[in-house]
Image: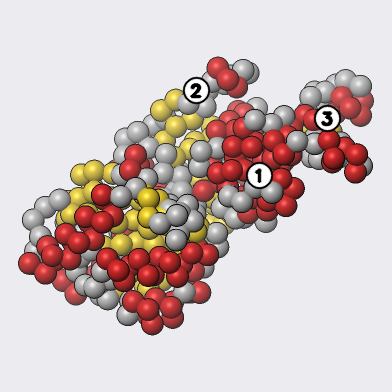
Amino acid sequence: MIKNGLRLISTGLTNVQTALRGCNFTSAKLPGNAMPWFGMDIGGTLSKLVFFEPKDSPTTQTEDEILSNVTQYLTKNSAYGKSGHRHAHLQMDNVQICNRLGTLHFIRFLTSEMNNFLDLSKKIGMADNVPTVCATGGGAYKFEDIFKNELNLKLRKCDELDSLIRGLLFTVASNNNECYSWPQCTEYEQCSTQEYTFQYNEYPFIVVNIGSGVGVLAVYGPNHYKRISGTCIGGGTFLALCGGLTGCDTFDEAIELAAKGDNLKIDQLVQDIYGGDYSKIGLPGREIASSFGKMNSKDKWAQASPEDVARAALVGVTKNISSIVRPWAIIEKTDRVCFVGNFLHVNPIATKLLSDAMMDYGYKAIFLNHERFKE
């Protein structure tokens, strides 16, 4: 069934929560705000589902019956089949949406397992009383006909970037301990994250959305933003490199390998070229001069460990992202950069690298606990 459980959001709570909040039920024309309420972000790699479980009194007996079946299944399980997964530790309680008070549940699954998700939806009656569900991501277009034919369900398509910004602001405003940052710390093993109070109503700030690829947005107000940059080298690149070079199958496996590896055995450093620092331009000897630069022969590849290769891939992708973001912080005259996206899930190596890269130039790297459910 769904490979890593219904696999929680391809890029933070923000996109999906807009499906529940920003793309409102009135405009979606849901009769009587029919329950249950779902929001989806259907990405190229991962699909993310948010389920709103009302805690107030049901409005009709029919609503109560449908909710009982769906809620009992979704909330009594944390895994669905081989890969579906609900992130119980991320659930948000006492959330008010469309004048209803309830709990938000976060579920993820591989987009490639969409057929299994549809079969499960039919089995537990997830769509029995809901003619329309708000959805974002490319899959809202790609799978539109399948949802209609299999579930008799219409996908109301919400713009992905609108959803990202509005969902991020909603999440930060609704959850006091949503954001965190890294302190300046030279010994990685001795570092720990700190809670960070993000002033979401102060502008501008930059949002870096790291999914399969990377998008960089400048946010000037709750309804005013623009895409300023991006790169095709993102989480999809990291996973593909690790899969091809180490044989791992999943993102979680790739991260586990990287955590045990040493990229200095793979990457070529400034000191490998100069014998030390390049003092004239201020480059320290341990700065990476060439990602994978030491791997220039078959013998070296034969001796490389999967862990070291995965770590080098992770470091290379992350450093590329930070090098793209820094100039835009200067241009936009802001010292706050908010990083979101599935690439950052259970990935402290990347978040620490991004934080260090930002701090080196006087900028603050901010991260979200619901990094994958931002939309």
Q: Secondary structure at mark 1?
A: helix
Find residue 269 and name its label. 3
Q: Is residue 290 left or right of residue 114?
A: right
Residue located 83% across and 30% down the image: 269
Residue 130 x, y percent position in the rendering: 25, 72
Q: CA distance from mark 3 to mark 2?
A: 27 Å
Residue located 65% across and 27% down the image: 360
Q: How many numbered discs?
A: 3
Residue closer to the observer: 272 or 68:
68
Which residue is label 2 attached to?
Answer: 192
Find residue 10 and name its label. none
Specify few, some or many for label 1: CA neighbours under 10 Å numbering under 14, 14-19, or 20 or more: many
Q: CA distance from mark 1 to mark 2?
A: 22 Å
Placement of the N terminus among the 4 image quadrants: bottom left
Q: Is residue 300 left or right of residue 354?
A: right
Residue closer to the observer: 132 or 263:
263
Three-letter amino acid code at the position of disc 3: Leu
Three-letter amino acid code at the position of disc 2: Ser
Q: Are marks 3 and 2 in contact (CB under 8 Å)?
A: no
Which residue is label 1 attached to?
Answer: 321
Residue 9 x, y percent position in the rendering: 45, 53
Q: Secondary structure at mark 3?
A: strand
Q: Quadrant of residue 304?
A: top right
Q: Quadrant of residue 276?
A: top right
Residue located 34% across and 48% down the image: 78
Placement of the C terminus among the 4 image quadrants: bottom left
Q: Is residue 81 left or right of residue 346?
A: left
Sequence order check: which comes first, mark 1 or mark 2? 2
